[in-house]
Image: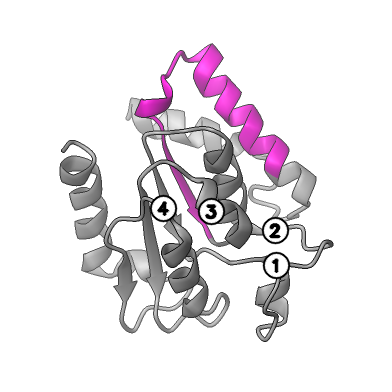
């Protein structure tokens, strides 16, 4: 119960939740504020912090993890970049792309679990594969056959893989 309340407080901390106004500066400022609150107000050490980002939430998650080492990172339906979602044939990062995750993820030094539905109709599955391939400390990913963008967590493999990652792989 206490953990659920704590998580709800952190989620409500983000200015974009639940209104979904994804302004780049807000995304980055919000996760920085949450990071500093966890570190200073709550005294949580970096190795005890697991970052979890889903879809657009993977953008600030990757950004923070590229600047600070944490216990682990979980990327659920990550996107390579904003331009690559909007224009799938884009092969490079443009200077005006506000969400260049594919360029930041090689700097992530923490263990990374990538999860993606193979039938994702919002962020193509190829984004998850590309992010996974660029992660220096990626662990075995979870590609969920039949899952789309908003239903991966309904498949039994999702919780099984999270549990394996957190209770076995991070402990060893």
Question: How are the residues colored?
Answer: one colour
Residue under label 2, please give it: 99
Q: Nearer the viewer, mark 1 or mark 3?
A: 3
Q: Which mark is residue 136?
A: 4
Report how far apart the C-alphas of labels 4 and 2 lie in the structure: 20 Å
Q: Which residues are magenta?
A: 28-54
What is the crowding at mark 2: few (fewer than 14 residues within 10 Å), some, or many (at least 20)? Answer: many
State which tag comes first along the sequence, 1 or 4.
1
> With 108 as the anchor, is 81 left or right in this view?
right
Label pair 1/2, CB-CB below 8 angstroms = yes
Q: Position of residue 75 (x, y in %)?
A: 45, 56
**Residue 4 is one of the magenta-drawn residues:** no
Mark closer to the observer (1, 4) = 4
The secondary structure that dominates the magenta segment is helix
Per the model, the C-alpha gap separating discs 1 and 3 is 14 Å
First reached walking from the N terminus: tag 4 or tag 2: 2
Res 32 label: none
Residue 35: in magenta span = yes
Name the residue located 62 percent from the left edge and 47 percent from the top edge.
60
How far apart, in angstroms, are the residues tagged by discs 4 and 3?
Answer: 8 Å
In the image, 144: left or right of 11?
left
Q: Is 42 in front, or is 58?
A: 58
Q: Which mark is residue 82?
A: 1
Q: Quadrant of the N terminus?
A: top left
**Marks 1 and 2, how far apart at CA:** 5 Å
Q: Which residue is mark 3?
A: 105
Question: Can residue 150 be seen by looking at this rendering?
Answer: no
Helix, strand or loop for disc 3: helix
Q: Nearer the viewer, mark 4 or mark 2?
A: 4
């Amino acid at each position: 119960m206490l953990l659920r309340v704590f998580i709800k407080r952190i989620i409500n901390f983000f200015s974009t939740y639940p209104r979904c106004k994804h302004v780049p500066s807000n995304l980055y400022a919000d996760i920085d504020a949450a990071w500093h609150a966890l570190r200073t107000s709550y005294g949580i050490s970096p190795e005890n912090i697991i970052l979890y980002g889903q879809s657009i939430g993977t953008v600030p998650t990757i950004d923070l993890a590229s600047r600070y080492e944490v216990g682990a990172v979980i990327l659920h339906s990550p996107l390579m970049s904003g331009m690559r979602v909007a224009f799938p044939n884009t092969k490079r990062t443009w200077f005006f792309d506000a969400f260049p995750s594919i360029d930041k993820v090689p700097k992530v030094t923490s263990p990374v679990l990538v999860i993606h539905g193979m039938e994702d109709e919002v962020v193509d599955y190829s984004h998850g594969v590309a992010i996974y391939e660029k992660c220096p400390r990626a662990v075995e990913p979870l590609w969920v056959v039949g899952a789309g963008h908003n239903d991966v967590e309904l498949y039994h493999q999702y919780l099984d893989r999270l549990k394996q990652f957190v209770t076995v792989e991070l402990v060893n």
